[in-house]
């Protein structure tokens, strides 16, 4: 029988909340890589004022998130929503000395982006590659080979400067132009990106089409090919409602870094069928229910997403945010 909290919700917990019960094979801790301020806001029609972005990041840090992807140093014509990256970063400087430490990675596609980021004292960057030619062209105006060549000096210089480099790999399962992406093609692209020297590889289901068996198959292919599981992260979009089940499958395979977006903000401006990311609140609800430590104050995080939804003028799509804040489902 499952233990539940008493009716009415003791200790401020929602009524009927079951006590945590774990499952075999799960990590003890999960680090959430929060992408709302970047992946979320890059896809908004309206450009959010810089001061609101800065407040968003501070509220996320106050809620206990320790890795908060802040923005992108990309061409402003390609992603006008994040054209204020150079103005935003100094407004986040006070987060530097926090305990626990707050990491503020930013996306950089090329050396120009890296120079701008390093000039502002950024300590963690991410390059973003594609498993398919169509998305490489749409997102970076490059072939897969050309994009890897563009990343090579970025990764080398960043590592030489002691800066962490995440490598995103998009379209790991399906691609809106090319359909299903063969696992061998994804594994080959992942390996090339990893071998550039990325400290972490985030596997993106950019259009949210994957299901758990496919996730496990890809993870097994990559770890079987020598990429340690502790270097892998997963990045799911929730287009078909599969993001949480895919995450659980990845956790059971030993993945301990999960990307998520507060309130489920997100998408990708260069992939039409990409909808919101996995909502951080939905993820935290599941992790806490499994007894996995995150360090996140869920009420505070939900309040942040409600606040951000007000700024954007529409409700959060996260089921957990809506349930916790008594909004209609
Ligand atoms: P391009 O047009 O081929 O650039 O774009 P270029 O190298 O030919 O240079 C053209 C001009 O852009 C030059 O200026 C450069 O200086 C300038 P001009 O001489 O004409 O005045 N430029 C820059 N300006 C500012 N910052 C820079 C920069 N680089 C060049 N970094 C480029 C190539 C890569 C720049 C462009 O395609 C671009 O910015 N793409 C970014 C697209 C993007 O941000 N997409 C969203 C992120 S990916 C994603 O969301 C997926 C993910 O979430 C995972 C998942 O879900 O799968 C990560
Ligand atoms: Mg994404």
Image: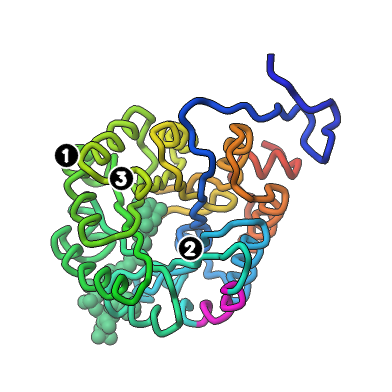
Q: Secondary structure at mark 1?
A: helix
> In the rendering, at what x and y percent does residue 130 appear?
25, 54
> Is the stretch drawn in magenta largely helix, strand or loop?
helix
Q: Image quadrant of residue 2?
A: top right
The dot on residue 228 is 3
Ligand 1 within 8 angstroms of badge 1 C-beta:
no
For residue 185, side relative to residue 329 (left or right): left
Q: Quadrant of residue 175?
A: top left
Q: Mark 2: give few (<14), some (14-19) or many (20+) Cα within 10 Å.
A: many
What label does residue 97 carry, if any? none
User: Where is 304 relative to 176, above or below?
Assistant: below
**Residue holding disc 2:** 69
Label located before the other in sequence (3 or 2) = 2
Which residue in the protein does label 1 denote? 184
How far apart in space, not on screen, are marks 1 and 3 (Cα)? 18 Å
User: Split into 4 quadrants, where in the image is the C terminus?
Assistant: top right
Looking at the rendering, the stretch of residues picked out in magenta corresponds to: 87-96
Observer able to see residue 144: yes
| Residue 254, above or below 106 | above
Taking the magenta stretch, the answer to whether it contains residue 216 is no
Tell me the CA gap for discs 2 and 1: 29 Å
Please, is residue 149 above or below residue 161 in the view? Answer: above
Q: Are marks 2 and 1 in contact (CB under 8 Å)?
A: no
Q: Is residue 101 left or right of residue 78?
A: right
Front residue of 78/203: it is: 203
Q: Quadrant of the N terminus?
A: top right
Label 2: element kind: loop
At 56% from the left and 70% from the top, the residue drawn is: 48
Residue 206 in view (yes/no): no
């Amino acid at each position: 029988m499952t233990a539940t909290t008493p009716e009415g919700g003791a200790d401020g917990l929602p009524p009927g909340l079951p006590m945590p019960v774990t499952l075999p094979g799960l990590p003890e801790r999960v680090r959430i890589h929060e992408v709302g301020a970047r992946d979320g806001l890059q896809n908004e029609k309206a450009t959010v004022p810089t001061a609101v972005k800065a407040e968003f990041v501070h509220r996320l840090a106050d809620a206990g998130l320790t890795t908060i992807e802040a923005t992108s140093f990309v061409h402003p014509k390609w992603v006008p929503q994040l054209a204020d990256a150079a103005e935003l970063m100094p407004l986040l400087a006070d987060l530097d000395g926090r305990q626990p430490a707050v990491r503020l990675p930013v996306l950089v596609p090329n050396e120009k982006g890296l120079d701008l980021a390093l000039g502002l004292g950024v300590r963690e960057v991410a390059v973003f590659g594609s498993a398919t030619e169509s998305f490489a062209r749409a997102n970076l105006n490059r072939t897969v080979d050309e994009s890897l060549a563009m990343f090579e000096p970025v990764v080398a210089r960043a590592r030489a400067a002691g800066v962490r480099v995440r490598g995103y790999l998009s379209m790991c399962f399906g691609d809106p132009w090319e359909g299903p992406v063969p696992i061998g093609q994804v594994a080959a692209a992942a390996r090339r990106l990893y071998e550039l020297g990325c400290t972490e590889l985030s596997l993106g289901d950019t259009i949210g089409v994957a299901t758990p068996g496919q996730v496990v198959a890809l993870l097994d292919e990559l770890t079987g090919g020598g990429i340690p599981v502790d270097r892998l992260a997963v990045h799911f979009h929730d287009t078909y409602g599969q993001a949480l089940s895919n995450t659980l499958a990845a956790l059971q395979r030993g993945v301990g870094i999960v990307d998520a977006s507060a309130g489920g903000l997100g998408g990708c401006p260069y992939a039409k069928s990409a909808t919101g990311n996995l909502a951080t609140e939905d993820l935290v609800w599941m992790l806490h229910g499994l007894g996995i430590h995150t360090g996140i104050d869920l009420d505070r995080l939900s309040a942040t997403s409600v606040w951000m939804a007000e700024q954007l003028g529409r409700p959060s799509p996260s089921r957990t945010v809506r349930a916790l804040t008594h909004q209609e489902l």
